[in-house]
Amino acid sequence: MKTNKLGQAIYYHLEENRSIYFFTIVLFLVGIVFGAIVVNSLSLTQKNDLYMYLNQFFGQVANGEFAQASTMFTHTFAHYAKYFGLMWILGLSIIGLPVILILLFLKGVVVGFTVGFLVNQMGMSGFLLAFVAVMPQNIILVPAFIIVSVASISFSLKMIRNQFVKRSNQPIFPQFLRYSLLILCVGALLAIASVIEAYVSPAVMRVVISTFV
């Protein structure tokens, strides 16, 4: 029975926000493309400077000069939790809607720039590094960011309708509870992503760097 209710809730959420999901996914993909384009627009000096810092980082990883996994987990989880918390707060305000879209776009830009720069500078080795360093946690983070963005946008739109459309008399508190519960449930995935980023990715990166770089 609980499984059926959960499935119905997910189906209702997807149906209700189908157009928002489409828009946010397209916006995120545009951000990735923009980030990759930015790589090509960098000057040779900027690319060389970034590549120098990247090589220093790779040297530290190869030598095991890396922050402790527990410390990395704490910092990573706190960073993502603050990001989710900010989006939750923005969803509670009418003026937060454009900021949510900007944050999602910037997330795409960061992913696109990181992968694009590694591939641009290092070819197949850069692709392998991006695959083991960027992709594992983002397989969880990207859907989580999109779900949180959609939930925040949807609730913000409901706030706007309740504020300006007089015929909209839906009680806002039950919707607020559902919105907050969804953010908390998706936020639980941050722990898994942080574990991957802190414990798994550095170990795999060390192997790839030692073998291919």
Image (spheres, rainbow, N blue to C red):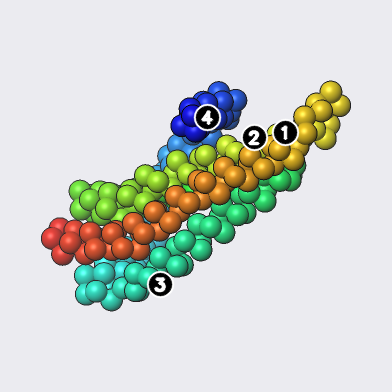
Sequence-earlier tag: 4 or 1: 4
Residue type highlighted by circle 2: Ser
Q: Which residue: 46% across, 32% down?
A: 3
Q: Position of residue 59 (x, y in %)?
A: 24, 71
Residue at 57% from the left image edge and 42% from the top image edge? 182
Q: Residue furthest right?
A: 166
| Quarter of the rendering containing residue 192 | bottom left
| Residue that carries the numbered disc 3 in the rendered image | 71
Q: Position of residue 89 (x, y in %)?
A: 67, 51
Residue 19's disc is: none
Q: What is the x, y in percent for residue 67?
A: 35, 74
As measured in the structure, the alpha-carbon distance from the residue carrying label 3 to the one carrying label 4 is 39 Å
**Which residue is labeled 2 in the image?**
154
The residues tagged by marks 1 and 3 sit, at their Cα atoms, a distance apart of 39 Å
Real-space Cα separation, disc 2 to disc 4, in angstroms? 21 Å
Q: Is residue 213 left or right of residue 8?
A: left
**Which quarter shows the C terminus?**
bottom left
